[in-house]
Image (cartoon, rainbow, N blue to C red):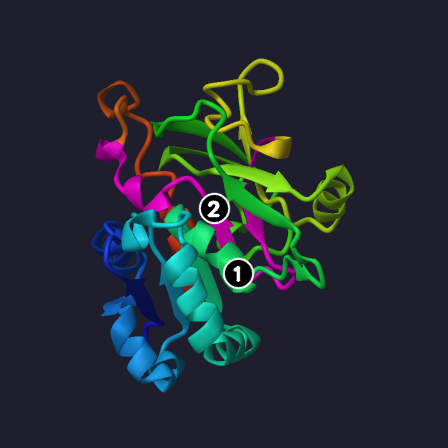
Amino acid sequence: MSPRVLILRAPGTNCDEESAYAFERAGGVAERMHIARLLESPRVLGDFQILCLPGGFSYGDDIAAGRILGNQIRHHLADACREFRDAGKLVLGICNGFQILLKTGLLDLDDEGGSRATLTWNDSAKFEARWVQLAVAPGNSVFLQGIEEMELPVAHAEGKFVARDEATLAELHNAGRLVLRYTATNGAPSYPANPNGAMGDVAGVCDRSGRVLGLMPHPERFIDRTQHPRWTREPNRTTGDGLRLFENAIRYFS
């Protein structure tokens, strides 16, 4: 039986259909569900193997990006989500979903002082929508196994990864949890290769188990090779770079 994927949406979410399509292309069975339904019946989560928090602008990004939906999950669904994760299941947060994950505690980045990392306003102080090159260091991340590099689009205003301090950044690096970084052909990436000024050029982080991943780029927007702006000039590309991430997630349960 194909793994079942819950695509959680809220007012302002706008990438739920693309995320569902990506998982289905990879061989999963995806269902889009409004947060109100899950709040009514948290036990429904147990019927799925993968939870995806897709991109968009949940609740209009009022207060801060992902804050309201993140608080709903933290205060009303924390036990159900922890049980889901601890049962060996997978959680994926894309863009706004990454922002939400950081506010739920599911990425294991909290201590007694609060979250040790956050996502804040881009250094450019504006919305950035562009394609970026990514270096992949999979570590234990289920989603990224066998992938060395990707090219994906970003679209965000609050995507700058900031750790509490350099020591925290080094600790996360040494633990193999900084699994995606912006990169450039020549030397260290500066703007726009690093579109937001992220510390350590970090574009994605996983939890200790490797079963929870948050990333700012949009893998669901590059599933087919024709979605790339240079697809007619790159005839050797057969699929989009993002598809393997979803295939890895589905294969994990095969």
Between 81 and 90, the one nearer to me in the picture: 81
Question: Circle 1 sits on which residue?
Answer: 212
Displayed quadrant of residue 49: bottom left
Residue 22 is situated, as x and y percent measured from the top left of the image, at 28, 53
Image quadrant containing the N terminus: bottom left
Question: Circle 2 sits on which residue?
Answer: 215
Q: Is residue 254 visible?
A: no
173 on left or right of 125: right
Q: Is residue 202 magenta?
A: yes
Mark 2 to mark 1 CA distance (whole Å):
10 Å
Seen at 55% across and 18% down, the residue is 190
Between 102 and 18, the one nearer to me in the picture: 102
Residue 203 is situated, as x and y percent measured from the top left of the image, at 52, 38
Q: Which residues are magenta?
A: 201-227
Seen at 26% across and 50% down, the residue is 15
Q: Is residue 210 magenta?
A: yes
- The answer to whether 35 is drawn above or below residue 53 in the figure is below
Residue 93 is situated, as x and y percent measured from the top left of the image, at 43, 55
- The answer to whether 94 is drawn above or below residue 51 in the figure is above
Displayed quadrant of residue 53: bottom left
Residue 48 is tagged as none
Which residue type does callout 2 highlight? Answer: Leu
Q: Are marks 2 and 1 in contact (CB under 8 Å)?
A: no
In this view, which residue lies farthest toward the front? 63
- The answer to whether 104 is drawn above or below residue 216 in the figure is below
Q: Secondary structure at mark 1?
A: strand
115 on left or right of 160: right
Crowding at mark 2 (Cα within 10 Å: few <14, some 14-19, many 20+): many
Q: How many marks?
A: 2
